[in-house]
Structures are given as C-alpha cells and as structure tokens.
Amino acid sequence: SPPAERYEYQAEVSRLMDLIVNSLYSNKEVFLRELISNASDALDKLRFLSVTEPELMKETLDFDIRIQGDKDNGIITITDTGIGMTRQELVDCLGTIAQSGTAKFLKALKDSKDAGGDNNLIGQFGVGFYSAFLVADRVVVSTKSPKSDKQYVWEGEANDSSYTISEETDPEKLIPRGTRLTLHLKRDAKDFAHPERIQKLVKNYSQFVSFPIYTWQEKGYTKEVEVEEDPAEAKTDNQDEKTEKKKKTKTVVERYWDWDLTNETQPLWLRNPKEVTKEDYNEFYKNTFNEYLEPLASSHFTTEGEVEFRSVLYVPAVAPSGKDDIINPKTKNIRLHVKRVFISDDFDGELFPRYLSFVKGVVDSNDLPLNVSREILQESRIVRIMRKRLVRKAFDMILGISMSDNRGDYEAFWDNFGKHLKLGCIEDRENHKRIAPLLRFFSSQSEEELISLDEYVENMKPDQKDIYYIASDSVTSAKNTPFLERLAEKELEVLFLVDPIDEVAVQNLKSYKEKNFVDISKEDLDIGEKNEEKDKEIKQEFGQTCDWIKKRLGDKVANVQISNRLSSSPCVLVSGKFGWSANMERLMKSQTM
Ligand code: ADP
Ligand code: MG
C-alpha cells in the first residue's frame, strides 16, 4: 500500500495545539465530552442522510458509541458507527479550524488575555477534536466513510506541527463504518484509561447524548456452587447425627468483561417536565449549543391536538458578537427533529421570525416527513401552526424574565435583545400586543432607569390622553430640547427614544392601551391648553412678525407659526405634521449616504 503522507497543520491549529499541550493544565477531563460529542454529531449526520440514502447503512445497522479503557497500557479507544471521514475530509476537518466552537474559544482566549485574565477557559468551551491532546501524546483516527471504499488512518502527536494520513492495512483494525479514535495517554494522564473513571465521566458529561454509549466494564454475577462440607465442621454442628458427607451450597462471584450501557438515551424533551430539574435543562443547553453561560430562561412544552410536537426553548444570557446578525441571522439556534431523528439546524428561519432568531432550542415533530426540506417547511400548514406556538412560548418566556424578582435578569435581556424586540414592532404586527409590554425606555422622569409602557401609563396625568415621546440621539440632548419645556412644567412624562430604531418601532405600534404615541416635536402638539380667545389676540399682535421672518428665511422653512409650546425659549424649529421628524431625517440620511 502507498506510504503515509505527511501534512502541515494550518497555522491556527498549530497555535491551538501548542496551547493545549503546553499551557492548559486544568479540566483535562473535558476531552471525553468533546470526543463523544463528535461521535454523536457523526451519528446524527448519518441518520439524517440515510433517510434519503438508505444504502449508507448497508454495512451495519448499529448506531452507537463504544469506549474502551486499557489501564495497563494507558490507551482509550472511542468507536462510533457514524458517518466517518473520507481522506479529503480528514485533511479538511482535522488539519484546519473552520469550526465556530473552536474559533469562539480562540477569541475568548484572546479577550481574556487582553483583559489580563487567566486562560482557564478550556472547561467552558472545549476545543473540539484537539482536546484529545490534553491527555494524549499520540492520537490515531481510523475512519471509514460509507462514501469511500477505503479506511484511512490519521495520526498526530503532541508537539508536532504535522500529521500523517495513510490507508488502513491491518485487517484486524477494519471497521464496517464510522470512526475509531485511539488515544495513547500521556504518562500523567494514564488514570483516564481506568474503566470506572471512564464510566463516571460519561455519566457526568454525556447524559444528553441521544445514542447509546457503551463502556467496557468488568462485571460480575453471583452463582451458587455446591461444595462438600468438611466432616469436622459437620460434627460440631450436628453432634447427634452420624458423621456423613453432606452437600452444601456457597455463593461465589464470577467475573467477566462486557459492554455496559452507560448513558440515558431518552432525549430530554421526551421526558416529563415534572421530572426534569433546572440543572438538567441548563446542562442540556450547554451541551447542545456549546455554551458556557447558563440561559436566562427555559421552557419545555408539548402540544397536542391539531399538530403534535415537543420543544425545549431557551433565552441565552448574551447575544452573539457580530453586528449584522440581527438583520441577517445565520444562527443554527433551532435544532429540528422529526420523530426523534435530528434533521437540521438550518431551519431557524422557517420556525421563528428573524427578530426572535436569538431564541435557542430543540423542536421535535411527529407530523413532518423525515425527508423534510426547506421547500416543504415553507409550504406546510403544520409548520405555520408550530411557528405560531413557538413564538407564543418564546414571548411567555421573555415575559417570565421581565416579571422575575431579579431585575438584573431583564436588564441583561434588554441589553442584549431589546433591539430584536423593536425590530419585532416593525416586522410582526400580529404580535404587537405581546411585544409592547416588553419594551423599555428612558424618560423625562426616569433618565437612569428604563421604564415599561405600563409604568408610563400608570404615571399619566388624569386628563392626559396620549403617550408623549421625543426622539433624539442621547438622553442628554433629549432632556435639553426646548420641546420639553411646557410638558415639564405640567409634569407630563415624555419618553426619550434614543436608539435610532426606537422611533420607527413606536410609529409602527401607533398606540398602547388605546393611547396614541405622540411626537412632541411635531407642529400640532396639543397638550390640552387651547384658548381660542387668547390665540386670536396673539395672532393679531405677532402675525406680521411671522410673515417677516418667513420672508427672511424663504425656502429654508415651510412655515412660521405662533405656538404655545415653549415657556422660556423664544423659538424652536419643528417638523411638519406629516413630515419626517428631525431624528428620522438624520436616520434616513445615515442610511443613504
Ligand atoms: P466541531 O465538532 O465543533 O465541528 P471538532 O474540532 O470537534 O469541531 O471536530 C472537527 C470536525 O472533525 C467535525 O466537524 C467533523 O467534521 C470531524 N470529526 C471529528 N470527529 C469525528 C467523528 N468521530 N466522525 C466523523 N467526523 C468527525
Ligand atoms: Mg466537536
């Protein structure tokens, strides 16, 4: 067979390997979680593809993960019957970093270093495949893709900037399909090969893997064996009886080695919510979405009747970094299953409106076909109903956070996802009723703490009909605007819309609890103090002055009017009733230039 070929790692991989091998010492045990999660991903991929290509399974129908520890030689093998890798995939997957999880780790590591922090981040992130080098100084990956007729062997060593790939030639090592990892443990990590240690780690870290994980364990069963009684002993027991050989039984333990099913394979979402703890939900979240922070909220529900599906949804604690994800989310946040089979995490857009794309979760439907595609989803009445329910549950979850005793939770939520909800005001008219109570603003009477629209309404004056707002670029400039003067004098509260999207959001809402949103910078502001007699008098007195000013300013202004909205400033520039507000104009300019 052809000789092994040698390849250099991509520079980032070398850097990562160097870091793993030489500077990360704590939490080494996460390697097992990472490698099991890869095996589980590989099984998921196969199960999904085999729906349309059943011939991929012809070598074996098994879908499982087997882990064997050899403590005498310090070797662990992890074998899965998943999708395996072709030669090219070995190069692409194990020689370069394309993966977000690992990339995220490197970034966090850099951030924490920049901040002078230590780099004990590995337990939080995991670094995927390369975490094998936390415990091993040599790693062998022997893998057989059902798309290839050959099995290939990848071999890499700690402190080496290259790896090799060759064909598997040893007939004893051939596998029907999938991947076998062999870890040759470092001297100080040999304990990890102890079967009991492996069992414990699997129970700790991989309880939510939905494929069976078997570990190689020493077992025992008891059996009764007949023994011949010692005549001397018999004598003392039965002094009256004649001495005679009697048969007696004894219990002995027979030892043997066998595969032991070590995890619970019932998916979390199929379990009874009453029997699942908050810790379980949080662990499931961290495992499934490669997150290290606990979620702000979770919701587990089943719907029956017209459409049957189960779901566990989460609100993350932080928004992903990157600016354009709100407009163009590519999130992989919703994992769609059909009858327990993982289908894809690419259908977020079909199951949630984009303004809720930050919600993470799993959805499992019994009503969709296994070969479901985007086209089918988009046409499906079932999906429309699912989407509606999911959105409702998401709002319930967010409302729950807003009512939590811990005010900080909602502040964190608003900080991260407030923009999304405002986008919802623009894009989802149908859910205005659900979104509006969740909005928060600063106001002329609450410059430091955000208030809700309910709080605003509660604080309205008895004869106040409208909800007043002023759009500006900051709280400071909002509170110094002359438009506020009269309202402040009458102690009317004014919302400060300081985020560029606020004004459009509020204009889309139009009203809240039957109270209209009114821009105090527009020309016809009526704060309930019209006095026609007096207006007439003033108009007579100052009419000519207005005409004169209008002449001087010409086209620069549309109109010059007498108004009663100011108390100390002599004049103010306002927007026409049907025109853009000054803030909108600023916004539009920034969009087009
Ligand atoms: P991630 O799992 O986040 O993609 P990893 O570093 O853990 O990143 O793995 C890199 C890639 O290597 C995986 O995306 C997958 O394509 C491939 N891979 C790793 N382990 C296996 C396996 N057991 N079977 C098939 N492919 C695997
Ligand atoms: Mg991985």
Image (tube, rainbow, N blue to C red):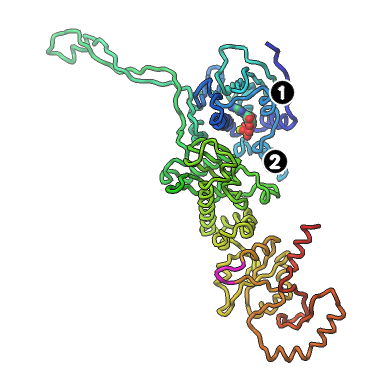
Q: Residue 61 at what x, y percent from top left? A: 49, 24
State whether residue 378 is above or below residue 58: below
The disc placed on residue 160 is 1
Which region of the structure is painted magenta? 510-515
Residue furthest to the top: 244
Label 2 CB less than 8 angstroms from ligand 1: no
Q: Name which residue lies at 47% across and 44% down.
A: 310
The disc placed on residue 225 is none
State whether residue 309 is above or below residue 564: above
Q: Residue 383 at what x, y percent from top left? A: 53, 46
Tell me if I can see residue 204 in this picture.
no
Question: Which quadrant is home to the C terminus?
Answer: bottom right
Q: Quadrant of residue 517?
A: bottom right
Name the residue carrying label 2.
Answer: 107
Q: Residue 102 at what x, y percent from top left? A: 66, 36
Q: Quadrant of residue 534?
A: bottom right
State whether residue 180 is above or below residue 487: above
State whether residue 354 is above or below residue 455: above
Q: Is residue 325 magenta?
A: no
